[in-house]
Amino acid sequence: MNTYKFKLSKLAILFCILGLLLGIGAGIYTGFRIYKYGFSSPLLIIQYIVIILIALLAIVLFASILIRSVYKVNDKEIILWFGFIKSVYKISNIESVHLFTKTNKLVLYFKDEKYTVIVVKPEWYNDFIKDILSRDSKIRYDVSTTDSDEIL
């Protein structure tokens, strides 16, 4: 099984780090409020529980996106782990792989007229394509090149 790390944009990484910091900050602030004010009313207890749960969810979600966002290619399927969200694509359902050189995007087209854009480092496109094509010889591979006479 080959693994290719998901390429997050700098803005996405920044938002994940910001989400982590906000989750940690909310947990620390809530802990401080529990220490200072205690559990003086039922409404305050509910508020603490909700804030702590949301802070934990934010920490787990954003940390998992930063740590475990990968494509895994095995003999029968491509598995995308985006944090703790898992998507599985059967290699036998892939009709074609298309590389758009103008936009530098790699797209998988499936038999049911669906598609997905692969988000890995462009340097890994060749290895990723070879990996998929070696699993099923029926998959078509296309490349769109830019025309030098194209008018913008």
Image (spheres, rainbow, N blue to C red):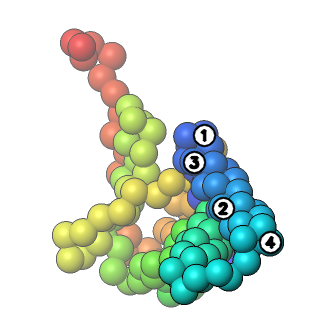
The residue labelled by disc 4 is 35
The residue labelled by disc 2 is 26
The residue labelled by disc 1 is 10
CB under 8 Å between discs 4 and 2: no
Q: Quadrant of residue 35?
A: bottom right
Total numbered circles: 4
Quick one: SS at disc 3? helix
* Dot placed on the residue nearer the N-terminal end, 4 or 2: 2
Judged by depth in the image, the label closer to the viewer, 1 or 2, is: 2
Q: Is residue 39 visible?
A: yes
Quick one: SS at disc 1? helix
Identify the amino acid type marked 1: Lys
The residue labelled by disc 3 is 15
Identify the amino acid type marked 3: Phe
Rounded to the nearest angstrom, the CA distance separating label 3 from label 4 is: 30 Å
Please report the residue visible at 29 percent of the width from the left and 72 percent of the height from the top. 110
Side (left or right) of 130 relative to 60: left
Rounded to the nearest angstrom, the CA distance separating label 1 from label 2 is: 24 Å
